Amino acid sequence: MAHRWSAPEQVRSAIVSARVRMYTTGACAFCRRAEALLAARGVEHLEKLRVDLDPKLLVEMRRLTGRRTVPQIFINEQHVGGYNELAAIDRDGALKALLAP
Ligand SMILES: N[C@@H](CCC(=O)N[C@@H](CS)C(=O)NCC(=O)O)C(=O)O
């Protein structure tokens, strides 16, 4: 029989410690989808950088990524791309590896 505390331990092990940050805006459907996918993969602390509120963050996002659309997602300082790219690496298994401690 499983130990009575095994379920909470499994939940804890699914929580991701990778640093995940996302350049985002307040009204962005792709950003919401990205956030939901990251949450579903165990990302509890998503650092959101609101480029619509701070023009310096928009300049920074463009400089770092060469892109102008949001979201732009970084995992442990590695640029993943936007929502479509995040969903693609989720499908092929690479997201799990990136998020692994
Ligand atoms: N293929 C991109 C699409 C992202 C996208 O179109 N984002 C919109 C906001 S939801 C945007 O930044 N629009 C501004 C623009 O196209 O300049 C992705 O998957 O992230």
Image: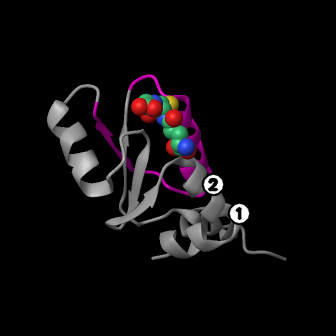
> Residue 90 location, x and y as percent?
64, 62
**Mark 2 residue type:** Ala
Residue 58 in picture, x, y percent from top left: 24, 38
Instruction: State the image coordinates of residue 84 (x, y, percent, origin top left).
Output: 59, 50
Residue 31 shows up from this direction: no
Q: Quadrant of residue 23?
A: top left
- Which residue is under mark 2? 87
Label 2 Cα neighbours within 10 Å, binned few <14 / some 14-19 / many ≥20: some
Q: Is residue 64 left or right of residue 14?
A: left
Q: Is residue 29 magenta?
A: yes
Please report the residue visible at 31 percent of the width from the left and 66 percent of the height from the top: 77
Residue corresponding to mark 1: 91
Nearer the observer, 85 or 77: 85
Q: Quadrant of residue 17?
A: bottom left
Residue drawn at x 52%, y 62% as measured from the top left: 15
The quadrant in which the N terminus is found is bottom right
Residue 50, quarter of picture? top left
Q: Secondary structure at mark 1?
A: helix
Cβ(mark 2) to ligand 1 < 8 Å?
Answer: yes
Q: Verify CB contact (< 8 Å) between mark 1 and mark 2.
A: yes
Residues rendered magenta in the picture? 26-51
Which residue is nearer to you in this view: 21 or 52?
52
Q: Residues within 10 Å of mark 1 (few under 14, many from 20)?
A: few
- Residue 58, compared with residue 85, is above or below; it is above
Identity of the amino acid at label 1?
Arg
Verify whether residue 87 appears in magenta.
no
- Residue 100, how many percent across, how many down? 51, 75
Is 56 placed above or below 65 here? above
Q: Is residue 26 above or below residue 77?
A: above
51 vs 42: above or below: above
Quarter of the rendering occupied by the C terminus: bottom left
Q: CA distance from mark 1 to mark 2?
A: 6 Å
